[in-house]
Image: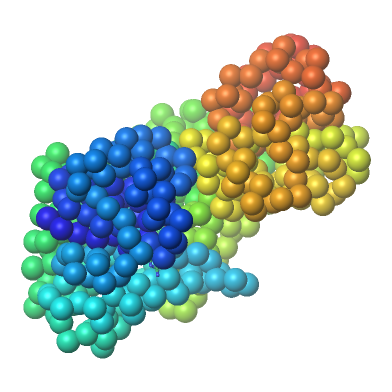
Amino acid sequence: MRCTVFGTGYLGATHAACMAELGHDVIGVDVDPGKVAKLSDGVVPFYEPGLEDVLRRNLDAGRLRFTTSYAEAAEHADVHFLGVGTPQKKGEYAADLKYVHAVVDTLAPMLRRPSVIVGKSTVPVGTAAALGARARRLTSAEVEVAWNPEFLREGFAVKDTLRPDRLVLGVDSSRDAAGWVEEMVREIYADVIAAQVPFLLTDLATAELVKVSANAFLATKISFINAVSEVCEATGADVTMLADALGYDARIGRRFLNAGLGFGGGCLPKDIRAFMARSGELGADHAVAFLREVDNINMRRRTKVVDMAARACGGSLLGANVAVLGAAFKPESDDVRDSPALNVAGMIQLHGAVVTVYDPKALENSRRVFPTLNYATSVAEACERADVVLVLTEWDEFTALRPEDLNRVVRAKSIIDGRNCLNRASWRAAGWVYAGLGTP
Ligand code: NAD
């Protein structure tokens, strides 16, 4: 089949390449000509393991191309995926829908045949129905809007797109064309469905809410264990052993129960805030109160790590040398959007410390967002004469570190394990002062 993907960021570039991998004839559209040029040359503009292979294979096969031209895309296909960003509005909690609106406002007047816009971006409930009405005001062609939320994880994006845990499709059942929309989308995903991936057909509002609820639940698990870790700290209990023991209960599960610096990235924080804002508009006050606490607990972890760093430096960060290992919001990604690691690094710098950051993949993005921090190109360089070392993203390179690697590099043998990812016994045995979160 032919399809297009509007927005070629983490979601859209992956989706476009993977739809071509499924055998479809795909055009990816972006307003950023630099991104379009790179993708057209087979270069993925961000770090995503395995994506470049899929991209190149499908460019070479002639099934995939990228453009800035909406007209070319409108002409190409009847199924248009929408994968542009929905960031947090400046100074507010709500999602900014200006990019989503821009796609619909530009694309809809160009549609000449019956078409379906399949939303993949994460949006507040009610957006899809409003977009359908908006699109239909702009064209005399039959246009439908469906919602097929995306659940991919950065670092596993290709696998998650080709073999997701489930496919959710929301359609507007009040429209005569609802059956046709479902048929088109099922056909696009035929190979995925044939691989026994569950396909759930819902109304538009449910599909939108599945995505934000999934993210809110994941965020809740993390904030839950972080709240419990405060009690562990007060009592000398060990939150990692506790989480292991909890995790054996199949009703709970071990994943997303790692206490530490908390969640960040381009999705969870802004999605729970947008969910909070939308719940408030709808009068769902319990959801607002609940989500607010999840967010508060998470943000408190960052100030706590800053306090721990100050304590490690004798009570004040002024003039201290601080090494920060990790800048990406999580390992296997170069994404620094709302990164807890960089947020902590920035706060420590504001307290007067000299902060040097190292990350295996995210240095370039970090420099752009926080140009005033110092950046190193290796762990050893970052830790040179450090008064304290902070591990804030659990890259394998950091979890594999041994005290002997740093013994002679640092000024003081003091390490803060913001992700509870180090073997504390071996660091202590080597004479280091080790501090974790929720661990004795
Ligand atoms: P992103 O910022 O990486 O990409 C957005 C892209 O859209 C950019 O390349 C931008 O240039 C482009 N764009 C902006 N306006 C446009 C327009 N009018 N026409 C065409 N292109 C335009 O964002 P992302 O991380 O890919 O996220 C996109 C959406 O997917 C968000 O709603 C996000 O919440 C959701 N999502 C993201 C992930 C993830 O892991 N990144 C996972 C699931 C869902």
Q: Quadrant of residue 56?
A: top left
Foreground of the two, 283 or 182 = 182
Residue sitting at x 26%, y 82%? 109
How far across and how far down the image is residue 25, in percent? 17, 53
How far across and how far down the image is residue 179, in percent? 8, 68
Q: Quadrant of residue 22?
A: top left
In the picture, the quarter occupied by the N terminus is: bottom left
How far across and how far down the image is residue 99, in percent? 42, 71
Q: 380 left or right of 62?
A: right
Residue sitting at x 50%, y 64%? 87
Q: Quadrant of residue 313?
A: top right
Foreground of the two, 303 or 326 = 326
Against 332, residue 350 (above or below) is below
Residue sitting at x 84%, y 26%? 385
In the picture, the quarter occupied by the C terminus is: top right
Q: 147 left or right of 322?
A: left
Against 319, residue 383 (above or below) is above
Count every numbered label the image shows and give the total. 0
Q: How is the image coloured?
A: rainbow
Foreground of the two, 76 or 114 = 76
| Residue 57 visible, this orientation | yes
| Residue 297 visible, this orientation | no
Residue sitting at x 26%, y 86%? 138
How far across and how far down the image is residue 406, in percent? 74, 18
Q: 306 left or right of 4?
A: right
Q: 256 left or right of 42?
A: right
Foreground of the two, 162 or 126 = 162
Ligand 1 found in image quarter: bottom left
